[in-house]
Image (cartoon, rainbow, N blue to C red):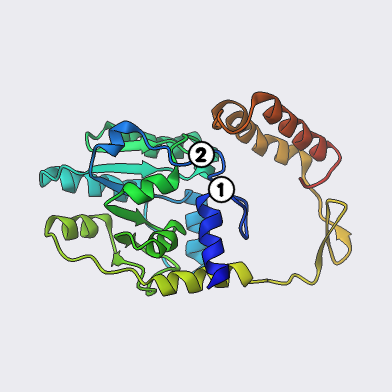
Amino acid sequence: MKIGNEYFEKRRFGKRTYEKSYTKGQEINYLPEKIKKKKVIAFYPSSDDEYRFLGESFGMKCLDQSEEIRIFSEYLLDNKDKREIVIRMHPNMATMPSSELEKYLSLSRYQNITVLEPLEKTDTYALLDHAEIVIGFCSSIIIESAFYKRNTFLIGPSPYLGLNLGNEFKTGKEAANFLIKKQSFLKPDKKNALMWAVYINLYNDKLDDFSLVNTYPLVCGEKVPTLIFWRLIAGLEKFYYEIFKSNSTDIKLIYKLRFVFKRFKALIKNKWY
């Protein structure tokens, strides 16, 4: 119980758990005024590459998240539903290819959709607390929403299916139709959310042949090539977002530049950083 509760508290306040906190750059408790004044349905999509990767692990075909949100939105508009859809893009979606990023940003053309960009300062958890309904596909926000007993929707394939965390739907249209017909929300199982949090915190996948010595990765004692050229190419877009797009309230420019310098230095020395 204690381990599970600590997990949710750390996540809410941008502290590291079993992985780094992706919400550290957000302004705690900040919510735009225009959102505060509306009944909100909050969507939390995952980065598409992560979604596809996880989909392979549980052997189910993933949905096109942006397309499902579009269909959900249009269905509500067609039925004169006045709720606002807020898409809280995950911070690591900032490094997606621009063409993929644009699929989400372009949804703001709909009158009932507000898109919060990946590095925008709105607090993920202030939005979760305010929302009438929290919707996810494969994001762990589903676990957190269930823990806080929010009305929770899970759309499409996911490792969280069957945990009684909320209402489960095959498609966005199915979820929207549920709302229009004003059917009853399922009460999320907080105990299951806690058990998942404990599991993810205590899970340890031992890699006996892998080691990290002085920042050099070794497999069976042999160095893993770091492919400097390709890592530099892949890092350019990420560096751009870290310097120019990340939340200025969290990290000053001088610290961003120092971080980028350390990254390049590590690459030149053929290290993992």
Q: Residue at x 39, y 61 (%)?
A: 148
Disc assigned to residue 26: 2
Rendering coords of residue 43 (x, y %): 35, 49
Dots 1, 2 in contact, CB < 8 A = yes
Quadrant position of the C terminus in the picture = top right
**Residue 144 visible in the picture:** yes
The residue singled out by tag 1 in the image is: 14
- The residue type indicated by label 1 comes to Gly
From mark 1 to mark 2, how far is it between C-alphas? 8 Å
Rendering coords of residue 112 (x, y %): 23, 38
- Residue 69 left/right relative to 249: left
| Earlier sequence position, callout 1 versus callout 2 | 1
- Residue 231 left/right relative to 104: right
Using the image, determine if residue 17 lies above or below residue 189: above
Helix, strand, or loop for circle 2?
A: loop
Total labels: the figure holds 2
Rendering coords of residue 87 (x, y %): 36, 43
